[in-house]
Image (spheres, rainbow, N blue to C red):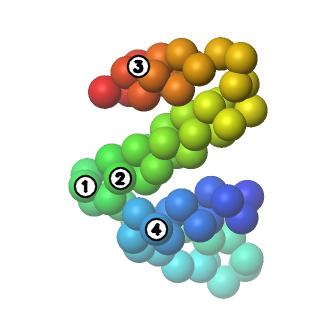
């Protein structure tokens, strides 16, 4: 799994563990899953704002799409 996704999963406080063969699993409540999704949206919107400075509307567009 991508380290950035893993970090967001930890920040959202998803529970989980390993199966023992190197495969990690995550368990989410509705609340933690929603928080995880919101963190991904926030990260994407912030990245768009930072990288597409000539298109400042992208940040708002992304945020509103997931409201």
- Which of the two discs, 3 and 1, labels the residue nearer the N terminus? 1
Report how far apart the C-alphas of labels 3 and 4 lie in the structure.
23 Å
The secondary structure type at the circle numbered 4 is helix
- Which of the two discs, 3 and 4, labels the residue nearer the N terminus? 4
- Which of the two discs, 2 and 3, labels the residue nearer the N terminus? 2
Mark 3 surroundings: few (<14), some (14-19) or many (≥20) residues within 10 A: few
Q: Position of residue 67 (x, y in %)?
A: 31, 27
Report how far apart the C-alphas of labels 1 and 4 lie in the structure.
13 Å
Front label number (3 vs 1): 3
**2 horizontally vs 31: left or right:** right
Q: Position of residue 43 (x, y in %)?
A: 56, 45
**Hey, which quadrant is residue 23 in on the image?**
bottom right
* Residue 44 visible (yes or no): no
Residue receiving disc 4: 11
- Which of the two discs, 1 and 4, labels the residue nearer the N terminus? 4
**19 horizontally vs 28: left or right:** right
Q: Is residue 26 above or below residue 19?
A: above
Q: Which mark is drawn over residue 65?
A: 3
Q: What residue is at 43 percent from the left and 44 percent from the top?
A: 37
Q: Is residue 30 above or below residue 59?
A: below
Residue receiving disc 2: 35
């Amino acid at each position: 799994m991508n380290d950035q996704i893993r970090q967001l999963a930890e920040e959202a406080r998803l529970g989980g563990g390993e199966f023992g063969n190197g495969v990690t699993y995550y368990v989410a409540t509705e609340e933690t899953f929603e928080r995880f999704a919101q963190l991904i949206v926030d990260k994407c919107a912030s990245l768009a704002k930072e990288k597409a400075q000539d298109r400042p509307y992208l940040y708002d567009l992304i945020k509103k799409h997931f409201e």
